[in-house]
Image (cartoon, helix red, strand yellow):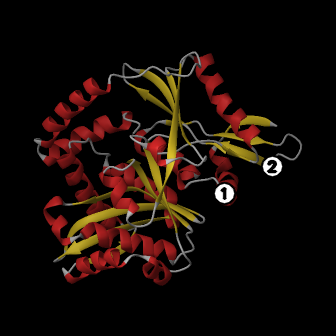
Amino acid sequence: MEIQIAAYSDLHRWNDYVSQHTRASAYHRFGWLQAVKGAYGHDSFGIIAKNKETQSIVGVMPSVIMRAPFLGAQLCALPYCDVGYAIGDNAEIEEQLRQYLVEYVSKTNTKKLEVRNIDNTAQQPESLKHQKVRMLLPLPESSEALLAGFKSKLRSQIRKAEKNGLTAVLGTEQKFIDEFYNVYATNMRDLGSPVHAKKWFQQVIKAYGSNSVIGVVYHDGKAIGAGLVIKNNTNASIPWASTLREYNKLAPNMLLYWSLLAHCADNSVECFDFGRSTFEEGTYKFKKQWGAEPQLLNWQKYNSTGRPITEEIDSSQQSKLRSMAESIWQKLPLSITVSAGSLIRPYISL
């Protein structure tokens, strides 16, 4: 076996391998690396393991080199999403791919490596307390079967949104990107969080093409909720979904998620990834009501010498500083948060 850095010419073979791999996510597609490069200029550092004799691909691991002004370079697998682990024909190949990145960091004195792995082992609820998980929902063969499997309370919440006059439309044209971004940027400002540039979402849609879709919920012709889904063969992920809080009483979130889940079920998606939540907290409970189950996220960090970073951060101090920053951000005009966020966000890997 040999390991090498992927080139653009590897795109189709890379995606073919990812499409057939049972542990691959939508983030493993080459499109994520393309979008990061196209929007923010960070260099792709996807690596491929090949059989020396046949040159067939036996494993891949996407990662990105993020260079922040005055802070140096770090390697992240993967930024702006929940996962970025190695996938291979077997566990040994996956470990060699991970070790390749660890050795690269050590040899080049890169500041840090972060690998956003998952833990496939069965977990007891008590062990998941305060832990970050991703929420996964198996989908049936059709939206009709999906709806029939929901509890009556969940179905009534979806109907409530429709009775309130809300409608949902799906697409990928610029109109949908613009409406999605307006809702997303407003919601992020209200949450006190820096926003991605609109160019980032344009690049995601461009790179994923038919493997992406935006859902927009309208009230009297105004976009009040929106979400973006990316797909890989039989699985899909929703990295971003937002609603305008003044309309939340109309239940736009319920119609938004239902329209996207229905689309996925009717288009051969077998597993829907609702994304990251803290076990038993608010967003976890929202995703749980749809029937999603938690899978533990196991993010691993290594320093410039390749050693695991295990020291604990003072969470109380960190929480206090974050609250202060969020409070200031919430008071800024939307236009300023969009401009400032577009400058800051490329260097925040979360």
Q: Secondary structure at mark 2?
A: loop
Q: Position of residue 238 (x, y in %)?
A: 42, 58
Q: Position of residue 92 (x, y in %)?
A: 76, 38
Give the left or right position of residue 11, taking residue 350 as reference.
right
| Quadrant of the image containing the N terminus | top right
Q: Is residue 158 above or below residue 207?
A: below
Mark toward the start of the polypeptide (1 vs 2): 1
Give the left or right position of residue 137, taking residue 47 as reference.
left
Please tell me which residue is depicted at 27% across the width and 26% down the height of the picture.
316
Give the left or right position of residue 333, taking residue 7 as reference.
left
Q: Position of residue 222 (x, y in %)?
A: 18, 71
Q: Position of residue 27 (x, y in %)?
A: 53, 51
Please tell me which residue is depicted at 52% across the width and 47% down the height of the picture.
124
Marker disc for residue 22: 1
Q: Name the kind of residue labelled 1 in the image.
A: Thr
Please tell me which residue is depicted at 67% across the width and 48% down the height of the picture.
9
Q: Secondary structure at mark 1?
A: loop
Q: Name the kind of residue labelled 2 in the image.
A: Ser
Please tell me which residue is depicted at 43% across the width and 62% down the height of the picture.
229
Question: What residue is disc 2 on?
Answer: 56
| Quadrant of the image containing the C terminus | top left
Residue 77 showing in the rendered view = no
